[in-house]
Amino acid sequence: MEDSTLGVLALYALLGLALLTLWLRHRALLHQRERMREKMGTLQGDLSDTSQRLDLLSRGVDTVLSESPDMQGLLDAHKSLESAETLLFEQDVNVSSSESVAIASHAAKTILVHYPGLADEDGHKEVVAGLFPLVERLDAILNEAEMQSEDLELTGDEHRRLGELFHGIDRTTRASDFYRRAHSLSAEDADALRSLATIHREEGDMNALDRSLERLLAVDPDDVSVLKEQALLLSGSDDERVTRNQRRLEGLGVEFDTTLQTAELSDIVERAREVNREVDPRATEPETSAGWIERAAKLLMLGEIPVALESVEKAIETNPDNGEAWLLRAKLLSADQGGTKDALQSIRRATALGEYGVILESEVFENDGRLDAARAVLEERLETNPEDAEARARLSLILLRAGASEWSRKVLDEAPSESWEIAPLHVMDGRLHLLASESHRDDTGHHDQLILLDALVSFDAAIDRDRESGLAWLGRSRALRYQGAPNEAEVALTRARRLIPEHPSIPLEEAQLCLDLGRLEQADTLVAEAATQLNDHSAIPFIRGMIAARQNRLLEAISLFGKVLASEPDHVRARLNRCSASLLKGDLASALDDANHLVTNRPELDMARLRRSEVLMSNGDWDEAEAELRRLLENRPEHTMALVHLGTCLIARGRPEQAEKPLNKTLQIDPTHSDAWYQRGLLYTDFGRLEDAMHDFENAAEHDEHHIDARVRIATLLHEAEDTKEAAAAWRRVLDVDPEHRLARRRLEESRGTSGPPKPSQPTEG
């Protein structure tokens, strides 16, 4: 009994202990709940207090902004800039060049809404308080996106107003860019030029100020203040224009004396004249050889070759051992075709004095038409200095221009590893890859994507070493265009145009890009720009021929392609396009000559064999056309157009039972091939399988809504089946494609005539 009693007591003790533990936990939970309730109450109070403060602040802001609606609008501009920054820089999705331009242009226009640019009675232009910080953010966006004024889709007036805002925040370089763009878009608007002249005065840039004043006079020849200011600036340096301005002022009845003793120059003009004494190479007489060289270099930039040459001669007189002077003398002499001999002597003298003249010497020889001598100079240099990357790149370029692409490649392959640290070698490497890809395209009709990838790698390597290499960006643009990436190509081309705006290949490449994008008018404008410097380049008539062909001016296109072939008989694309244009024009003999030439010289070019088969089919030479198509299909068994043409040939040769196989194969490869559906429909029509034929004609019309032959066949089958209502609808669909189709119009009238109400029966005699 004692054991059982102890067990019961132990059980009670355990139960009591468990109850005590539960009670203590319960007390702790109650205490915790009370603390949480107190904290929630405090938090609720804080939230209520914060809400009241925010409400008070919101009502205060609304009250303030109610009296300043312009400030309310700035909030919208702020949101627009936030969205622009997010879309351009803070998302993982890349945006195209056109999208970036649209985003930045929208942000700029949002700011311009709050700056109409209208001046008050005193001529001052009011700016809404708080607008300038937004302009600074826009400037930061443009800097980050590497955009200039020409990238934004704005009018001349909008460019000018943005220039004024950038000027207001002391972004003078940006403001000058927008003023110049405004002037180029609105040449008769003098406000942009006046603002640009203001910047030139502030900077003391006399030459730029003179140019702006001259443009202002072109807009308003009788502007008295401009005439006076320019006369003061040019006093003692350009007597001809000073006299011109004085005569205009006299004609306007304004007395003006330009002598420095009587003229009261403003501080701005005085500062400009001080800069002139430092910058204008004609203002003072140098005393040292280096001074004469500096003067000559500035005169060369101004295009005054004879005067610059005189300065160089004086530099040499002052110091005959100045190698830089001899090198500059050679450069000036090389501008004159008759000065080649003296230029070469000057280069050798400069080289003897330690100057690097091998590149200039090769250029002089090349400009004189002596390519062998230019090559020999560079080769001699590389024999003693194989690491000279500039000479190696120049030699590779000369060989490429001479048509020795393999030799040009060999020169690059022999370059030491340390030579590849400069951009020009990588640019040449990329150009040779592009040439190889173009050769592959001429042979096969398409680019080799691996070669294009190698070209892109080379151009990117050049850009990594020199982001200011315009030729690298230009090459990258062409490689991307060949890859079928026009948006990226356009971005690279924009960079190239900024870096080398005068390079003649820029408008030519841009014209090619516009041609690929179907912008024919823009391409025509650009090729005209390129023709001013590259009139003899075969690409000029070729692009114009392509534009004419796409605008259905076939005779003009044939003539232009012929011009290309006259200077470059192996131009594959010109001959192929001339063949196509002649075929469309019905000149089958000329088309066949071009096709035969291509097939003979480019046996792997599928398009050449296809064109030849089409010419032969048009001539009714079905046997030879079939043979040509079978030769094509031996190399490309899945060439769908060749399979369709083969079916056509077999039908024409009276072997319709054999024609179904190539047509079926075509539709297995490409179920959307409308011509295959149509040809098989014709075949089934001959077999009397009208339901199958109708099905194929409907598929042809479905996959090509302009396939009028298929629609005519559908309507004909319905008409012959005397399905009047459906036939009428089918003939109307034919007229939707060709409103002048005579058969469709006549049959539609017939269908309407037979679908009228039934005539009443004649009464019978009783």
Image: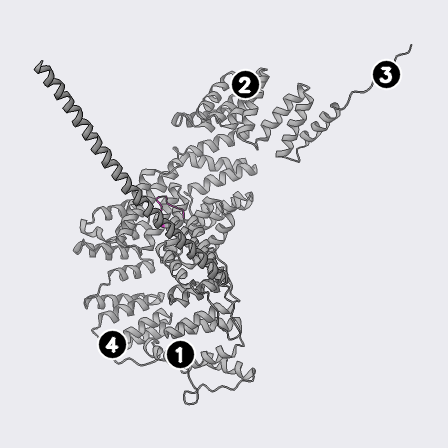
Direction from residue 22 to residue 188 in the image, left or right: right
Q: What residue is shown with label 3?
A: 762
Q: Is residue 725 magenta?
A: no
Q: Which residues are magenta?
A: 89-96
Q: Mark 2 or mark 3, which is nearer the start of the sequence? A: 2
Q: Mark 1 or mark 4, which is nearer the start of the sequence? A: 1
Q: What residue is shown with label 1?
A: 268
Q: Is residue 95 magenta?
A: yes
Q: The residue tagged with tag 2: helix, strand or loop?
A: loop
Expressed as whole percent of the image width and height from the top left, the position of residue 255 reads 52, 86
Q: Amino acid at mark 2?
A: Gly
Q: The residue tagged with tag 4: helix, strand or loop?
A: helix
Give the quarter of the figure containing the N terminus: top left
Task: Name the residue: 38% across, 27% down.
Answer: 635
Q: What residue is shown with label 4?
A: 289
Q: How many marks?
A: 4
- Disc 4 to disc 3, how far (Cα)? 122 Å
- Disc 3 to disc 2, how far (Cα)? 52 Å
Q: The residue tagged with tag 1: helix, strand or loop?
A: helix
Q: Mark 4 or mark 2, which is nearer the start of the sequence? A: 4
